[in-house]
Amino acid sequence: MKKSTWALVVLLGLMALAYFSGVLDQFDLAFIQQNRELLQAFVLNNPLLGVGLFILGYALCVALSLPIATLLTLLGGFLFGVWLGLVAVAVGATLGATILFLIARSSLGNPLREKAGPLYQKVASHMKNNAVGYLLFMRLVPIFPFFLVNIVPALFGMSVGAYCLVTLVGIIPGTFVFVNLGQRLGEISTLSDLVSMQMLLALALLGAFALIPTLYRHFRPTSGESP
């Protein structure tokens, strides 16, 4: 079995373990609120270790596509404040997304390219020329599943460097909002109260602006056409 296949098998195994072990059922908003003083004391006594463990834990959760990213982002704001929390979350999320991207590219990208034929080549060519704009749009607008956004660019040959940079930049606006809200962790009763229509519209508008250059390149007249 190839190393890339082994990596995918390990990833899926850890993902299944996390889902079926019951750990996710225990880790919720109530658990964090009940233990917030203990967590805060640990970070105060071990600042570097606390930040390091948080980044690694966040990266692992993103790589395994566990549905607790919002909760962890709030926790980052509560434990580290706005700016350090923003850095810790952004680094952890980018690291985890890159791990998933690399595994998907090596284990799924090549087989897809071999079997998809001309249609894939046509779509891949368009994606390659506009990958940054599309990925930035999907990162900024929080309506796309984070799991799919991490994988799709890997299937169409986006470079690792561009993927990491766009991921880091694209998640900052939404992360800043939730990290800031995390400072009021004790006042939050449910995660659904945090997402407002105004917030979604603001991020969607930001994503739309990011997509304008890509749309312009796609629809602009060619040299043989009138402007």
Image: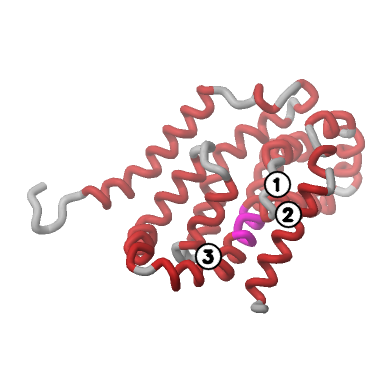
Residue at position x 44%, y 73% from top?
Answer: 114
Residue designated by label 3: 160
Magenta-colored span: 94-100
Mark toward the viewer: 1 or 2: 2
Which sits in the foreground, 200 or 46?
A: 200
Residue 98 painted magenta:
yes
Which residue shows up at 67% across the image and 78% down it? 1
Who comes first in sequence, dot 1 or dot 2?
2
- First-in-chain label (1 vs 3): 1
Residue at coordinates 90% horizontally, 43% vertically from top-left? 42
Residue 90 is left or right of residue 49, and the answer is left
Q: Is residue 122 above or below residue 58?
A: below
The residue nearer to you, when weighing 152 against 19, is: 19
Membership of 182 in magenta stretch: no
Label 1, residues with CA under 10 Å away: few <14, some 14-19, many ≥20:
some
Q: Are marks 2 and 3 in contact (CB under 8 Å)?
A: no
Outermost residue, bottom direction? 1
**Helix, strand or loop for disc 1:** loop
The residue to which callout 1 is attached is 66
Which quadrant of the figure has residue 14? bottom right
In this view of the protein, which residue sits in the foreground, 67 or 55? 67
Q: Are marks 1 and 2 in contact (CB under 8 Å)?
A: yes
Q: CA distance from mark 2 to mark 3?
A: 23 Å
Q: Secondary structure at mark 3?
A: helix
- The mark found on residue 163 in the picture is none
Q: Residue beneath label 2, please?
A: 15
Asked if residue 38 is positioned above or below residue 130 in the image, the reply reads above
